[in-house]
Amino acid sequence: LLGGGPAVAGVVDFPVEGSANPYMVGLYFTRVKLGNPAKEYFVQIDTGSDILWVACSPCTGCPTSSGLNIQLEFFNPDSSSTSSRIPCSDDRCTAALQTGEALCQPSDSPSSPCGYTFTYGDGSGTSGYYVSDTMYFDTVMGNEQTANSSASVVFGCSNSQSGDLMKTDRAVDGIFGFGQHELSVISQLYSLGVSPKTFSHCLKGSDNGGGILVLGEIVEPGLVFTPLVPSQPHYNLYLESIAVSGQKLPIDSSLFATSNTQGTIVDSGTTLVYLVDGAYDPFISAIAAAVSPSARSVVSKGTQCFVTSGSVDSSFPTATLYFKGGVAMTVKPENYLLQQATSDNNVLWCIGWQRSQGITILGDLVLKEKIFVYDLGNMRMGWADYDCVRCRSTSPPHRGRTST
């Protein structure tokens, strides 16, 4: 499955487009085929939420065009012969009510549609109702061939969007939540016996981006694993310490402990990295102290930046995040810097990590150029540094709607 690289013990293969660069795209997205007749929908890959939803017709606040050079599509359940609305009386709705992922009023009749309202970390929101319909996907066979498969899944049909979801510059058709709740597609396909309780991604870091997303495990010898924090709505890890140039920083590890108000989560739906307040200043100070003398320190719009004519790797230090079990995650300069401007031979690089209250979020900036394996069966997460350009998807080539 992966050219010149790791083998995949996986089943379902999704193509990936987009990038971690907020000045280019700032999100990674894939395509899902839904309904009968099947139509393709572009959806953001989001490991920080659970539900797959797409914009439905009619919709209030939904963009009708996108700056990503993709054609937006509205799902119409009435136009699909295999679509059915999920009523409040359905067991799947009842289960979702327990987790706050469904809405039914006491006054609703049992046949009333099972609704939802989600608010995301950036304040944007969406609401709609659940439907069941056919999802089509490419199943990876052992001989590098793909076979077409399908399954009936429950997903959201959104008829209202607010906040940044209304903007056209990065508009997609919906969000593909890869969380652990039973209504997430990964959980549904596992319970149907279609795919394992594992998924993996390798997100390219180059500006044209892309990568691969596999429901299954990417097998790579360099993978290291650390346990997931149990009973959490997100993919929480036990972050224990941070080092810059091999020197551990004087940060109280309790700042990273998981509670209702703090913790460390992995979230592909977040573009940058958010570091808890008490760790932020020591991290920035250590980076600044270790920067090559040839790099000039400047502050731009309140952010620590550097002007350098040298290469990034020779001018800036490498950082390391240490997790439970002594497992290390390498943070190269490209994982904490954003290129802001170029003049002659000089490049302005700014710290892309943001200060956070309580929650540390590891977003696309640090996830890129690594294989990540979410092994939910064993409640652990693994990663390895990897040049994701070497990953080649088995999916058929993209037809005309490309993100550049």
Image: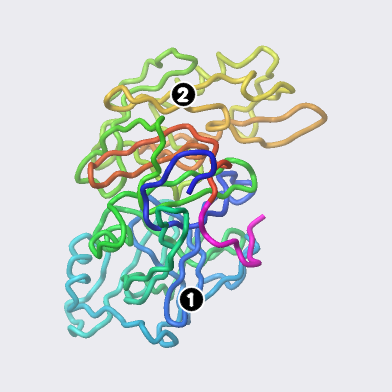
Q: Nearer the viewer, residue 197 or 72?
A: 197
Label 1 Cα neighbours within 10 Å, binned few <14 / some 14-19 / many ≥20: some
Report helix, strand or loop for mark 1: strand
Q: Position of residue 299 (x, y in %)?
A: 63, 27
Q: Give the residue displayed 33% in from the left and 44% down from the top.
A: 374
Q: Position of residue 362 (x, y in %)?
A: 42, 38
For this view, does 272 lie left or right of residue 362? right
- The picture quadrant where one finds residue 357 is top left
Give the magenta range. Answer: 393-404
Say if the magenta span includes residue 401: yes
The quadrant the C terminus occupies is bottom right
Q: Nearer the viewer, residue 138 or 202?
A: 138
- Per the image, the residue denoted by label 1 is 60
Q: Name the disc covering residue 328, or none.
A: none
Report helix, strand or loop for mark 2: helix
- Per the image, the residue denoted by label 2 is 281
Q: Are marks 2 and 1 in contact (CB under 8 Å)?
A: no
Q: Give the residue displayed 52% in from the left and 59% down from the top.
A: 395
Residue 29 visible (yes or no): no
Residue 215 lies, with reference to residue 286, above or below; the image says: below
From the image, give the main secondary structure of the stretch colored magenta.
loop
Residue 98 lies, with reference to residue 27, above or below; the image says: below
Cα distance, mark 2 to mark 1? Answer: 42 Å
- Does label 2 or label 1 sit earlier along the sequence? 1
Q: Residue furthest right?
A: 344
Residue 94 lies, with reference to residue 121, above or below; the image says: below
> Which residue type does callout 1 highlight?
Thr
Q: Give the residue displayed 20% in from the left and 82% down from the top.
A: 108
Label 2 Cα neighbours within 10 Å, binned few <14 / some 14-19 / many ≥20: some
Q: Position of residue 55 (x, y in %)?
A: 46, 72
Q: Position of residue 337 (x, y in %)?
A: 58, 32
